[in-house]
Amino acid sequence: MTHLDYKRHIDGVIERIEKARLGVSDHHIVKMVAVSKYVDEASIEALYAIGQRAFGENKVQSLQRKAASLDALPLEWHFIGSLQKNKINPLISLNPALIHSIDSMELALALNDRLVREGKSVSALIQINSAYESTKSGFLPEASLHAYAQIHQQCPNIHLKGVMSIGAHTHDRPTIQKSFERTRSLFDQLPNATICSMGMSEDFELAIACGSTLVRLGSILFPAC
Ligand SMILES: *Cc1c(COP(=O)(O)O)cnc(C)c1O
C-alpha cells in the first residue's frame, strides 16, 4: 500500500468512528488507541506520520522494546494485556499513559505496592469480564463496583479512570451488544469515571453506540499484516 492509500484507509476508519460517535451525540468524544501488538516499529512510525499518537501493547516486553526504539517520538503508550506480577516493575518504569487491565484485587495491591516504593502513580482502568467468558480475565460484573471502590480506597497510587471490556467472542451481535451495555451501565454508576474502553476492529461501531469513549483498534489499522 502506498503512503497515500494508507492515509485514505486510516481516514476511512476515522470516518466510521466519527459517524458512530455522532450517532450517540455531538458531544460524545471517542479516543482511538492503535494496538500495535502485531506490527514492528516501522508500521508504528507510518501511522504516527499520519497523526496517530496513542498506541497500545499487550506484552510488557514488546512495549519496552518499541517504546525504547521509538523514544524520539512523542508517543502515548497504553498497556492493554494481562499483567503478570513479575512484569510490574518494568511496566512502571515505562510510565505508561494508562493501564487498561487491572483484573484482580491481588494485582491492584501488588501494583500499588511497587508504585508506592518507587514514589510513582499510574492511571488505570479495571477490566470487566462482561461477557462472562471463562477464557477472559477481569472482574465479574457483580463484583466490579465493589472492586473499584476497594481499589480506590486501598491503592492511593493507582488513579482509577474507568473500565475496560472485551466484547463477547461471538458473531451474534445482540450478545456482543449486551456485554457492552453491561460494561457501560457499570461505568455510569462509578463516581468520577471518564474512560469506558471497549471496541476492537470487529465491533467498534457497536461499542461506540453502546457508549464507549475509547476504542482499541489493531488489525484494521494495520491491514498489511
Ligand atoms: C489485540 C487487542 C485489541 C485489538 O484487536 P483487533 O481485533 O486487532 O482490533 C484490542 N484490545 C485488546 C485487549 C487486545 O488484546
Image: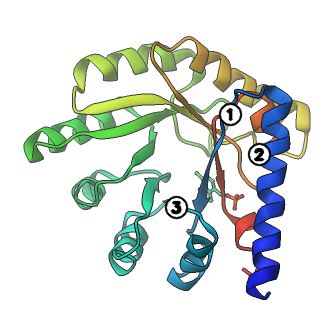
Residue found at the far bottom of this picture: 2
Q: Please, is residue 34 above or below residue 8 in the view?
A: above
- Three-letter code for the amino acid on which mark 1 is drawn: Ser
Residue contact at pointers 1 and 2, CB within 8 angstroms:
yes
The percent position of residue 223, horizontal first and vertical second, equals 77, 75
The percent position of residue 95, horizontal first and vertical second, equals 28, 54
- Secondary structure of the residue carrying numbered label 1: loop
**Quadrant hosting residue 136:** top right
Say which residue label 1 marks: 212
Q: Please, is residue 34 above or below residue 138 in the view?
A: below
- Three-letter code for the amino acid on which mark 2 is drawn: Phe
N-terminal of the pair, mark 1 or mark 2, is 2
Say which residue label 3 marks: 53
N-terminal of the pair, mark 1 or mark 3, is 3
Describe residue 183's horizontal placement relative to residue 140 as left or right. Answer: right
Q: Which mark is residue 204?
A: 2
* Viewer-side residue, 30 vs 182: 30
Query: Within 8 Å: ligand 1 and the Cβ of disc 2?
Result: yes
Q: Residues within 10 Å of mark 2 (few under 14, many from 20)?
A: many
Describe residue 89's horizontal placement relative to residue 45 as left or right. Answer: left
- Three-letter code for the amino acid on which mark 3 is drawn: Arg
The percent position of residue 202, horizontal first and vertical second, equals 81, 53
The percent position of residue 88, horizontal first and vertical second, equals 27, 53
Identified at 32% across, 76% down, the residue is: 68
Identified at 29% across, 33% down, the residue is: 158
Query: Within 8 Å: ligand 1 and the Cβ of disc 1?
Result: no
Describe residue 108's horizontal placement relative to residue 212 as left or right. Answer: left
